[in-house]
Amino acid sequence: DSQLALATVLGVVNFLGVAYLGGGFASLPPGVHYVGFLGAVQTAFPALAAYAVTFLIAPLLRSVANSKTNADIRRRNDARRAALANLRSGGAAAKLQRAKAKRKQLTTVSASDIIFDSSADAATTAKLKAKDDLDAFDDQLRRRT
């Protein structure tokens, strides 16, 4: 982790250097530009500032993302451990017995019990229902005459 410590120190020094340069450049009267090396630094200052901020923020964002991922992994592992403990304690066997007992209480649905069938699309179902309604109406008319 010495690399991490050195990278952190480098990031802080970089950020402090950019802050120092920013203070120096801000104290110049508007329109004044340095020449030579300081002119190049002044021109590149926005990029240097963006680099300094990104150098510190990128690892922080990565750390937050890793913390969330690790918390999700911990939750999954805890759930797996609980499931394993449940299996070892016989809790799953009792659940299976209760399910088998419930299965005996279930009723069987036959074709005559079906009210709605989703095997046809909605338009076809609507046409069939309309035809059935018209046929029932025609039957009632025939019975009355």
Image: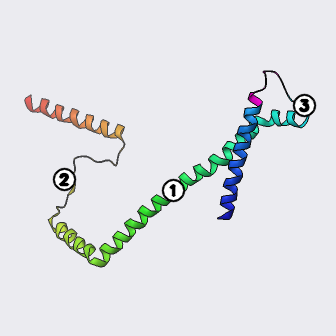
Q: CA gap, disc 3 to disc 2?
A: 93 Å
Identify residue type, mark 1: Ser
Residue 91 lies, with reference to residue 36, above or below; the image says below
Q: CA gap, disc 2 to disc 1?
A: 56 Å
Q: Residues within 10 Å of mark 2 (few under 14, many from 20)?
A: few
Which residue range is magenta in the image? 25-31
Image point (13%, 29%), residue name: 141
Q: Would you name the residue on which mark 1 appears?
A: 67
Q: Would you name the residue on which mark 3 appears?
A: 35
Magenta: main secondary structure equals loop
Q: Position of residue 132 (x, y in %)?
A: 23, 37
| Quadrant in which the C terminus appears | top left
Identify residue type, mark 3: Val
Residue 34 lies left or right of residue 72; in this view the side is right
Identify residue type, mark 2: Ser
Which sits earlier in the primary sequence, circle 3 or circle 2? 3
Residue 8 lies left or right of residue 42; in this view the side is left
Q: Nearer the viewer, residue 63 or 142?
A: 63
In the structure shown, which secondary structural element does the residue marked by tag 1 occupy?
helix
Residue 4 lies, with reference to residue 141, above or below; the image says below
In the structure shown, which secondary structural element does the residue marked by tag 3 occupy?
loop
